[in-house]
Amino acid sequence: MIDRRLLIAKIGLCGFLAANFIGFPDRAALAASSIVAAVDKDNDGTLDLAEVKEAAGAFFEKLNKDPDDTLDAKEVGARLGKSAFKAGDPDDDGTLTKDEYFAIVEKLFKAADANKDGVLTGKELQSKAGRALTRLIH
């Protein structure tokens, strides 16, 4: 005997998967375009390093919950992995200054800039480095 609930669930799943392949925009593309829109001060549809650093500075201040002007691993949270945090902390004091944070941001910016034109598009923000960068600016 066929279980109707299972059959209905399977049909629903097939419909959901088909809709995602056919008609709905990619969630990563939507996220990238919304970040470009939020950070793009000159409205040219791309992000240059100055725009990214401005957003990173504001986000640094948002993450910094105490008055010490640095970020510790707890304040950064899952936005930056342990090894990336350690690599970005050259003085090995367990915190990131704003300059150290900017150095990480700049490194990720350069890695995400696939065509080396000095600006990031929404598509470039969908790369691994681009996604890592967006976690540090927005």
Image (cartoon, helix red, strand yellow):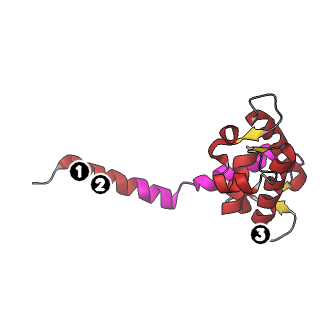
Q: Looking at the image, which residue sits at the far left? A: 1
Label 1 SS: helix
Q: Residue at x 76, y 65 (%)?
A: 111
State the quadrant of the N terminus.
bottom left
State the quadrant of the C terminus.
top right
Residue 78 percent across, percent down from the top left: 62, 45
Q: Is residue 57 left or right of residue 86?
A: right
Residue 116 percent across, percent down from the top left: 84, 70
Label 3 SS: loop
Dot in front, 3 or 1 = 3
| Magenta-highlighted residues | 16-45
Is 39 included in the stretch rendered in magenta? Answer: yes
Mark positioned earlier in the residue sequence (3 or 2): 2
- Residue 114, label in figure: 3
Mark positioned earlier in the residue sequence (3 or 1): 1
Q: Is 71 above or below relative to 87?
A: above
- Work out how far the residue at label 1 is from the one at label 2, CA to CA, in angstroms: 6 Å
Q: Residue at x 49, y 61 (%)?
A: 21
- Judging depth in this view, the residue of 67 and 104 nearest the camera is 67
Residue 7 percent across, percent down from the top left: 23, 53
- Judging depth in this view, the residue of 12 and 38 nearest the camera is 38
Q: Residue at x 78, y 51 (%)?
A: 89
Q: Is residue 117 left or right of residue 1?
A: right
Residue 88 percent across, percent down from the top left: 77, 54
Q: Is residue 126 visible?
A: yes
Q: Amino acid at mark 1?
A: Leu
Dot in front, 3 or 2 = 3
- Residue 6, label in figure: 1
Discs 1, 2 touching: Cβ within 8 Å: yes
- Work out how far the residue at label 3 is from the one at label 2, CA to CA, in angstroms: 40 Å
